[in-house]
Amino acid sequence: MKRTLPVRVEPLPGEALESWLAALATRMNATWGEVLDAVLPTGANGIAGSHRGAVLTTGVSDAERESISVATGVCGGDIDGMTLAGHYGSPLITIDSRTGRARTPWGLLYRQRFCPLCMRAFPGRRKLEWFLPWISTCTEHRCFLADTCPRCAQVQMVSDWFNRWMYTHPDRCRRMVKAEPRPTRCLARLSTSRCDRLRPGHPVLTMQQRLTELLAEDVVDVGVYRTAPVSVAQLLTDVQVLGNRILRAPNIAGLITILGRRASDREITRWLNTAPIPDQTRSKNPAAPGATRLGLAQPAAWVGSGVAAALTVLMQPSLEEAGTTLRTATSSALTRELRYRTNISRPAHSAAVTAVDIQARAAGSTVLNELRYRTITELPRLPDTPRFASKHAMLDAVPTLFWAEWAFRLDTEDLPWGTARQVLSRLILTIGCVMVTWELERRLHSTVRAQRVGLAANNLRAHPNWEGIFTALLRLHEYLQANPPPIDYQRRRSLNYDNLLPEAHWVDLVAEQGVGTTATTATAARLWLIEQLSGAPVPNTEQPLPCRGVCTDRMRRTLTPQLVKKLNTVAVDFLRAHGVVDEPPTWEPPLTLLEGLTLPGTPPEAIDPNVIHELVVSGLGVPAIARHLDTSVWKVRHQLEHHPIPSHVARTRSTRPVRGPLSVVAGL
Ligand SMILES: [Zn+2]
Ligand SMILES: [Zn+2]
C-alpha cells in the first residue's frame, strides 16, 4: 500500500500532471525518480516503472491514478483533469499506442509553449493547455505564449521532460547546450522570456477563446458548417488547412481588416513585428506535406494569427461571405488555378473548406467555372479526379442539341435556336467536368466553339432569370446522373445515317398520304430525321440544300399524324438495323423537374395547334405564321412536328405553287 506523502502541494487550476509532480519534487527536495517512486505503483524493488517524458501528462492508468491519489490525497477526478486524455479526451487527444504520446488532429505533440508571466507568478508551474499546439496565447495575461528559451532559443520539448536522477527545476530550460568538455543543461529561467502583450479584445485572443468554446462541443454546426456539421477534430483540421493557406500568402492589410482592425501603416508594421512572415525559402515546395505542419512548428504569434484568420473565415454566416473573407485575407495564392480533388495524403479538410475555397476563387470567374465548381449550390465542390479527364459519363446522357421542350423554357431568344440548344447542352456538360474542351467538342460533333459558348454563358448570367436557368441545369444534371436516359446519345452521335430515309422512301410515304412532294423536301426530311435521331446538328455539307429552312418547313407542312407514325417506324427500323433495339427514337427529360422555377422562355404548347393548322391551310408559310402569332418560328415548327395537320384538313389547303428545282408529283 502506498504511503501518504508528508507534504502536500495543491495543484493549480489547469495545471499539467507532471508540472504538479515536479512541484512536489521541488517541495520535497527530491529527484524526479524519487517522486515517481513515491507516488506511482512500484515493483518489488520499490522503483516505479520507467516513465518517458510526457507520458504521465498524456494519461494515467487506473493503478497509477489510484496510487497517486493515495500518496497525495488528491482525488482521482482531479488527477485525470491534469492529463490530456482525461481533460480533453477523444477526438482531440488520442494516445499513440507505440510511444504512449498524445496525438491531436494537428499531429503528435512534441513541444510545449509557456507564458513567461504565469511562470513568473508561479515558478515552474506549467499549464496543461500549453501542450495544445493551437493554443498560442495566455488569456489571463493577454500575451502570446513564448516559443523558445530566452537564452538558447530552443523549444521546450514534451519528451525528455525530466530524468529520474535529476532535480526537476521546472522553471528552467531543460535543453542541452554546447559546452566544454561536454554539453550541459541550459537552465535559463523561462520566466525571463520576452513577452508580447496583446490589447484587450484583440482578435487573436477572442478567436482562441472561440475555438476553445467550439472544441468543447460535440459537433460544430455554426458558420459555414450550418448545412453540413462536422466533428471538433474536423474543425481543427479545417482551421489548420485554412490557416496554412492564408499564412502561405497573406495579404497583411486584408488580414488585419478581416480580423476587425483598421489596416493603418502603424498597425501593419506592428503586425509584421509581432508575427513576422515565416521564412518559406527553406521549403521549396509550399504544397509539400511538410508545409502542413506549419501550424505546429511556427511561432505562437503566427499560429495565433492563422487560427484567428481561419476561424474568422469559417464562422462567417454564409459560404459567399466566407469566400469573400478568405479572398481578402490572401493574396497571390488564390491565382493558382482550381483543379480537381487531389489524393495526396494530407489532412483531409471538410467539404465546407473546399466550398469556401472555391467561393474565394469564384469572384470574377467565368460562368463555365461557376458551373464546373457549382458555386451557386449550397456546397460548391471540385470535380472528382483527373481519372475522368478523358471520360465523361454525361456525354452518353446529353444530346448535342439540348432537348427542345427544355430549351424552349430556358431560352432567352438572344441566340439562333440551334446555337442556343448547343450552348445549353454545353453548359450542362460543364457541371463537374474536367474534360479538355477540344475533346468535348470533338465528341459532341459541336458546331459552336468554346469561345462562343463562353460569351453566350456570360450573357445568360446577366439575364434576370439566370438563377432559374442555372438551377434547372443543376437539377437536370443530378436527375440524369441518378436516372440515365433511355438513349445513349454518344452512340446516336456516332451512328452512320447514310441509309436513313432515301428520297424514294419519302416519296412513297408522302404518296400514301395522297399529296405531292419535291426532291428538296425529301432531302430536308432526311436531314431533319437524322437530327432527330442523332441529337446533333447535321451540317449542310454532304447534300447541299440552299433553301434548307424553307424546304424543311415545307416538309413540316406535309406532315400528317399518319406520316409521323410512319416516320417513327422508319426510325425504329433504322435503329434496330444498327443494333439499337431498346431505345425510343427520341426522348425528353421530365418537365416536372422545372417546377417552381422562374424561367425566361414559354412553352410552345401555349400556341394552339389548330390555329397553326388554319393558318397553314390559308396558305401562310411558317415565318409568316410566327409573325402573325407573335412567337418564334421554332415554336410553330415544334407544334407542327408534334401536332401535324390531320389529313382531312390538309386536303382542304389551298394549292400554292410548289417551288423547287424538281417537282415530284406522286399519287394523285
Ligand atoms: Zn500567463
Ligand atoms: Zn535554454
Image (cartoon, rainbow, N blue to C red):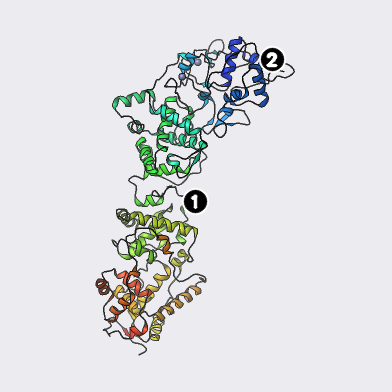
**Residue beneath disc 1:** 387
Mark 2: which amino acid? Arg
Whether residue 401 is visible to the viewer of this picture, yes or no, is no
Label 1 CA crowd tier, 10 Å (few <14, some 14–19, many 20+): few
Q: Position of residue 178 (x, y in %)?
A: 52, 14
- Secondary element at tag 1: helix
Label 2 CA crowd tier, 10 Å (few <14, some 14–19, many 20+): few
Mark 1: which amino acid? Arg
Residue farthest along the right direction in this orientation: 44
Q: Viewed as shown, does residue 113 lie left or right of 322? A: right
Q: Which mark is residue 3?
A: 2
Whether residue 21 is visible to the viewer of this picture, yes or no, is yes
Q: Earlier in the sequence, mark 2 or mark 1?
A: 2
The quarter of the picture where residue 452 lies is: bottom left
* Screen quadrant of the C terminus: bottom left
Q: CA distance from mark 2 to mark 1?
A: 67 Å
Q: Position of residue 212 (x, y in %)?
A: 48, 30
Q: Viewed as shown, does residue 534 lie left or right of 601? A: right
Q: Position of residue 623 (x, y in %)?
A: 26, 73
Can you tell me whether the CB of the residue at mark 1 lies under 8 Å from the nearest atom of ligand 2? no
Looking at the image, residue 229 lies above or below residue 94: below
Residue farthest along the bottom direction in this orientation: 668
Q: Which mark is residue 619?
A: none
